[in-house]
Amino acid sequence: MASLIPSEKISIVVEDDRTGLSITTLKRAIADNLFYNQGKFPTIASKNDYYLALAYTVRDRLVHHWLNTVQTYLKQEVKVVCYLSAEFLMGPHLNNNLINLGIESRIRQAVEELGLDFQELVDQEEEPGLGNGGLGRLAACYLDSMATLEIPAIGYGIRYEFGIFDQEIRDGWQVEITDKWLQYGNPWEIARPEYSVQVNLGGHTETYVDRDGNYRVRWLPDRVIKGIPYDTPIVGYQVNTANTLRLWKAEAIESFNFQTFNIGNYYGAVNEKIYSENITKVLYPNDEQLQGKQLRLEQQYFFVSCSLQDMIRLHLSTGNSLDTFDGKFAIQLNDTHPAIAIAELMRLLIDERFMDWEQAWSITEKSFGYTNHTLLPEALEKWSLELFNRLLPRHLEIIYEINRRFLDRVRIKYPQDNDKLARLSLIDETGARYVRMAHLACVGSHAINGVAELHTHLLQQTVLKDFYQLFPEKFSNKTNGVTPRRWMVLSNPRLTKLICSKIGDSWIKNLDELRKLEQFVDDSAFCQQWQQIKQEVKQDLAIRIRQRTGIIVNPNSLFDIQAKRIHEYKRQHLNALHIITLYNCLKQNPNLDVIPRTFIFGGKAAPGYWMAKLMIKLINSVGEIVNQDPDICDRMKVVFFPDYNVTNAQPIYPAADLSEQISTAGKEASGTGNMKFSLNGALTIGTLDGANVEIREEVGAENFFLFGLTAAEVQQLKTKGYNPRDYYNSNPQLKAAIDLINSGFFSHGDTELFKPLTESLLNYDPYLLFADYQSYIDCQKKVSQAFRDRANWTKMSILNVARMGKFSSDRAIKEYCRDIWNVAPVPIELEDLCPDGQ
Ligand code: OX2
């Protein structure tokens, strides 16, 4: 008889396949998901099937966090931040969730033990590109920080079927390809049709007298659309919190309009369905350029109405009355795209819940905060009264009433100042009449903020000057930040590891602790490791560049990178002028001893923005000549990295030696790429614009390459009268660069191709490239000089990273919580929500 093992020595734990974290369980769970979810077995499973099996395995492991979070918020009746944004540029979820859950290495091991390539599976994920650039990415960073700081929050937005287009470069031109991110399914979302709501559009209003003899208004719409929420969990870093991103999809109320169907108009009925679903089909791909399209206003109203109805449902479901609404929700407007929410909340409270105006207004004002992201006049949203009235007749009435009461108050403060009244009015009547969305946002919010010190200052002195004079107490600055989880831990694992080996890992949640790195700037072994890592990530990027473009670059050269949306105010063409100038120097003086540079660009142009597309063509055309010129002999390379998105950005930031932040002073509200580059050890060449000003303050002027006019000088020069041709005529290097473009040298002899660009510069130059040209060229010389002293460069790089604490989105979110939202952390305890037998 076999001897018995004493029972106290045995520890057999049977892990649940959906929550267990042992390698054995994880492997079984992945195999199970492949079989039961994907309906595939190994010999026929694609990489994508394996990716999905893995994604579901990870999702199972965060459901506990998610449900406990929801339950805690409901039970404790906490105040919730509702972040309303037309864009959320989340980037791939898989890796981020693994890092935040702290299960990356086990999952990797399980995947590898199954004989699969982990990176290959990660690469399968189609990123949700539901945003254009900085504004959408900021919303994503803020969701990460709110979850990490245990702040109850819901992100509300639109589930676009097609996100930002994929960019291909053909013959040097941008070509747009539809982004079919949902085509193989999205494992990270759960549809919640049970929480669907209805949204009205069009029609007219009528008044009636209710039973108590009060005059009321009802809206008789001519279209009704259904909004279906899709929820994605947002896991915090090393906490139990998992908040929700709730995105709305538009559908027809019934699959078929039966009446139309019965009278034989089958196609008419189907058309109506298609028409309704159009609302959430596609993201408008314009960054900071108003389009004024009806469908865009429909999108804005649709998601805002769905979200407010959802908040009211949540509030009433816990037995509350609407009197306490503002105590339970802090609603933040991410720019004016969701500003119609102010009129919609008024409508819901007054028309549908029969609240009186004064109380409804008091609740509305206390609930809303408004973040402004731009001063560019072409981005300030306004809607023609005709369109507004056709689509949202009741809201226009409400806006008129808000305006009437508001202007009455203004009149008391500034009697007989009709100019001021006209400037402040919610209605622009200077020509054709428009609703001014920023004015609606200012009047209906208790807090208004800009996104960097300089931006907030300029906001108060220019675009919102009258509002600032009227209610200075509403204004504050909230300098942007970025999440160190995605933009360091995930995208730069090598540097993360090195930093952790020196100062531990608490900096990941408290970025100010990076300061501790300063003590190592003179530690030569550390500096060498730092340099070594930069070298390795540059090699990685060099490989990607070769795969994507065929261009071979030298990883020992200075990687000079400008990655952001293509826009004249961001001045990618100023960068191009520097490249051409350097090229001319080398052609004239072939033996010149220069620091080899690789110029890397990335970014999309709005499909209808002709000048931006021509800038892309110019960069590629210059690259074509420079890269193949034997005289240059690898001392310069120009690369346009196609399809800049979150996925492609992740390996780009860590590989930069130099970060180009060269917008005309006063034009870039903040910038956030500037922070990501510097956090990853790049030095910045930049103007005193947006958050550059604060970055320079933090890292020290000696660790920052400054050039160009200040915002005030830009203003003065413009007032005085700016003539770009004077600069062209008096600066031989500048003249040579422009003349070379015009000669057809970069365009196979075509002297017309780039004329629109050069003529615009010579005759108008609205972003003052010529005025800043010499200062930029001189500053770039200093950069090259500095790069020769590699030891000192490395020291500056370390100091940049060590002093980036301020630019964590955690810091920014804490400020919003304290100054605007009045919300506090709510820690989540995990408990079994579904005990057996219950
Ligand atoms: C961008 C701003 O251009 C950029 O400077 C800022 O960093 C970012 O928002 C986040 O605040 N659309 N995009 C922006 O503003 C608008 C409008």
Image (tube, rainbow, N blue to C red):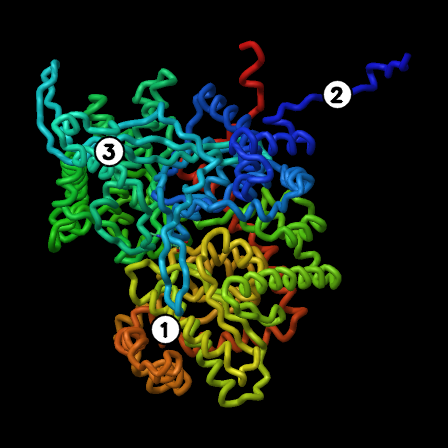
The secondary element bearing badge 3 is classed as helix
Question: Residue 405, can we see it?
Answer: no
Instruction: Say which residue label 2 marks.
Output: 12
User: What amino acid type is highlighted by mark number 3?
Assistant: Glu
The amino acid type, in three-letter code, at marker 1 is Leu
Contact between marks 1 and 3 (CB within 8 A): the answer is no
The residue under the point 54% across, 35% down is: 40
Task: Determine which residue is flagged by label 3.
Answer: 344
Q: Nearer the viewer, mark 2 or mark 3?
A: 2
* Structural distance between the alpha carbons of marks 2 and 3: 58 Å
Mark 2 element type: loop
**Residue lying at the far front of the rendered structure:** 43
Q: For label 3, count other residues whose C-alpha is less than 10 Å away and answer few (under 14), some (14-19) or many (20+).
A: many
Callout 1: SS: helix
The mark total stands at: 3
- State yes or no: Cβ of the residue under disc 3 lies below 8 Å from any atom of ligand 1: no
Query: Residue at point 51% right, 64% down?
Result: 659
- For label 1, the crowd category at 10 Å Cα-Cα, with few meaning under 14, some 14 to 19 and many 20 or more, is many
Label 1 C-beta lies within 8 Å of the nearest ligand 1 atom: no
Residue found 69% across the figure and 31% down from its top: 24
Rendered-image quadrant of the N terminus: top right
Picture residue at 70% right of the left edge, 58% below the top: 520
Residue 100, image x and y in percent?
58, 39
The numbered mark at residue 340 is: none
Q: Where is residue 524 drawn, in percent x and y?
A: 74, 63
State which mark lies toward you, 1 or 2: 2
Real-space CA distance between mark 1 and mark 3, rounded to the nearest whole angstrom: 44 Å
Pointer 1: what residue? 769
Is residue 617 depicted above or below 643 in this figure? below
Residue 391 place in picture, x, y as percent: 17, 39
